[in-house]
Amino acid sequence: MEPKSPSKVKLSVTGFSRWKRVLKVLSFGFLILLSLIGVYLAYSFVKARNVLESSYYTVVVDCGSTGTLVNVFEWEKRGLVNQGLPYLVHAYPDDSTKSPLWKKSCHYHCMQTEPGLDKFVGDASGVRASLEPLIVWAEQRVPREIHGNTPIIILATAGLRRLAAEDARQVLDHVEVVVREHSFAYSKNWIRVLTGKEEAYYGWLALNYKMGTIGNSLKADTFGLLDLGGSSLQVVVEVADEDGNENFMTSNIGSTTHDILAYSLPAFGLNEPFDRTVVMLSQNQMDRGLTTTNRFEVRHPCLASDFVQNYTCSGCAMPNVTALENSGSHMHAQFSLTYLVGDPDWEQCKKLVKAAAMNYSGPDWSQQLVGRNCEANISSFSGSIMLNLKAVAHYSGRFHALSGFFVLYDKLNLSRRASMTEIWEKGEQLCSRSSTKLSKNGGQYCFRVPYVASLIEDALCLGNAEIIFGPGDLSWTLGAALAYGLDTTETLASISTIKTMKIF
């Protein structure tokens, strides 16, 4: 056998040199790449540190009864030294926001998905579809390099409060799964159901922070809050001292202390009072509401003459057709399908709605509410809220009316300090038009006008107190963002302990 040539066993000197040069080039390129990565990381770190030193962001998601909304707040810490409060640089969304999620109809710069999360018990995909686009939009508003330092606070209100505790917990667990997949900082304690008292407090905090009446070295008179939602009414007023009221709380924020009464009234949002008017009418019209087609009609004095719509009413009285044929008796149905028919009568509408505003639902509503005395501490009939806010207010009675109140102001083109006379007159002009329709949430304006006026005059006993409508871009989410931000910032400010309350 012929021996192998040495040239076939060993690499040539030329080939070895070529590979050596290639390795040197690759090593040099790798070192350059590592250097570039290091420079980028260092730049990002310095940029993030500079951003954090000057400002920070808070994302708040409002899981309401009619929809889920998101707000992004940008803060600067320059106010911390003097007043104990940060400075709000910007709130998103704003008037320049362009997005399919933008809801012009809500009047409040809303980025919103519908319906509310309480409709998705046992439906994880529904929760995801509602929440994820809002979080993605918020991620685009916050600089990427500080996502991990930006808290996302997800707080539910009346919609989830109405659910059984285990159903609400299940919905929130689905929420947490979605949040965990995104880049914001979160805690399980930041995903929860607000108590009504907390919601009221955060609204008051947002209002007075924006108006500059809290956080100052000199204590200023604060504004009272009237916040009318679809499912509840929030009322907050500062008082002189504690009077044993269960709604009393102390707020220590900024450099001053405030004693307040914070009410959340679940039966006094826009939807339930309208239901009460239908219940009262169904009781009065039992014998004449059944048509020849066995359709039960309720004629409503707050609706236009050309209005006809089926309406599912909880608690309505409805004739039992079989029983009527046999004995003429009636049946009280828990959930009755009723047809609402417009039968406009402004004077009757005012009386009916006044009863509903006082949480009354009896058949004798037209005789029960004459000459009510706001000086009394107890109503003349069961169900009245009778807060008499002007009597307990720490100051002369200055209130800002938000949400549903502001929508009414916007619709009627009222002045920001409209008197009750102006509200009644504009309402009567509106309700004389045959085109007035029931709105999507059940709060049509011919109901809303007398309801708002009756709340202010009769149920809350505000009388001639100064009512200011708006600001229109304000909600309790600003107060929540402020409180949570202070809780995670090194300041001397302290927040009322209600922030730590839980329902589970």
Image: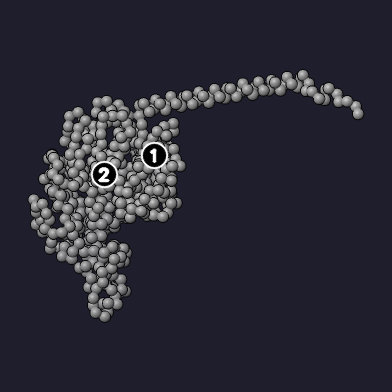
Give the structural element (helix, strand or loop) at label 2. helix
The amino acid at mark 2 is Glu
Q: Is residue 22 above or below residue 149?
A: above
Occupied quadrant, residue 497: top left
State the mark number for residue 198. Answer: 2
Rendered location of residue 408, percent (x, y): 24, 49
Residue at the far bottom: name it.
326
- CA separation, marks 2 and 1? 20 Å
Q: Residue at x 15, y 49 (%)?
A: 387
467 or 21, nearer to the observer: 21
Q: Is residue 82 above or below residue 242?
A: above
Rendered location of residue 295, percent (x, y): 30, 71
415 or 310, nearer to the observer: 310
114 or 445, nearer to the observer: 114
Residue at the far right: name it.
1
Q: Residue at x 61, y 21 (%)?
A: 28
The amino acid at mark 1 is Tyr
Quadrant position of the N terminus in the picture: top right
Rendered location of residue 14, percent (x, y): 76, 19
Q: Which mark is first along the chain, 1 or 2?
A: 1
190 or 224, nearer to the observer: 190
Q: Is residue 214 above or below residue 414?
A: above
Rendered location of residue 131, percent (x, y): 41, 46
Inspect this view and state whether residue 32 appears.
yes
Occupied quadrant, residue 291: bottom left
State the mark number for residue 186. Answer: 1
In the visual, does 381 lie left or right of 183? left
Q: Residue at x 18, y 59 (%)?
A: 360
